[in-house]
Amino acid sequence: MAGKVYQYYKDLPPWAKGVVVVGGALVVYMVGSRIYRGLFPSAEQKKNKELAKNVDAEIANLQRNGQKPSFTDSNYVTFANTIYNSMRFAVGDDYGTVETTMKRMKNDIDVAKLIKAFGQRQDFFFGIPAGSPMDLFTFVQKELGNDFGGLTNYRVRRINDDWKKKGISYQI
């Protein structure tokens, strides 16, 4: 069987051999990198898990201190979906909607509930999963803070400035 595969490869034109080699190397890289990321999580992945684990405790603490959410839980899910759908495409992202939606938060508990509703979401590059799932702040910083060599970072600054004026302690 192996001999037949090798013979078939030998009979291919030179350009097709190159395609097979490059394609095979790409498959090996993709599978290997997935296994590596699974065995050795990055600092970012560890931070994301910690944030997700602590957000419920943070919400309970804020409620004990008298903060009340400004919206219903379903509103936070809608906000999270709006933010995600405005950033998840390689072409046609709507960063203005992300900024506007995040500026709707009025206090710390609103931001904490938004973080919880967002959870961990996968980024895509032309329909192909890119990297590991990210929390809200990591996703927004990656998209708005680092896109185009930092040219869109002004949106992150405006969100942070807006939150600071409202007394929100979270910063992206």
Image (cartoon, rainbow, N blue to C red):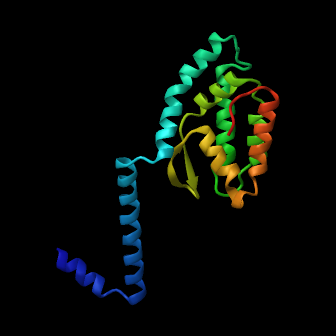
Q: Is residue 122 left or right of residue 34?
A: right
- Spot occupied by residue 31 in the image (x, y as percentages of width and height): 37, 59
- Spot occupied by residue 144 in the image (x, y as percentages of width and height): 70, 49
Give the quarter of the figure containing the C terminus. Answer: top right
Depth check, front residue: 27 or 68: 68
Q: How many numbered badges does the structure rendering display?
A: 0
Q: Residue at x 77, y 44 (%)?
A: 157
Q: Residue at x 64, y 41 (%)?
A: 84
- Spot occupied by residue 118 in the image (x, y as percentages of width and height): 60, 34
Q: Is residue 41 left or right of residue 128?
A: left
Depth check, front residue: 1 or 74: 74
- Spot occupied by residue 6 in the image (x, y as percentages of width and height): 24, 81
Q: State whether residue 129 is above or below residue 62.
A: below
Q: Quadrant of residue 151?
A: bottom right
Q: Residue at x 72, y 20 (%)?
A: 71
Depth check, front residue: 8 or 168: 168
Q: Is residue 165 left or right of residue 39?
A: right
Q: Residue at x 61, y 45 (%)?
A: 139
Give the quarter of the figure containing the N terminus. Answer: bottom left
Q: State whether residue 7 is above or below residue 139.
A: below
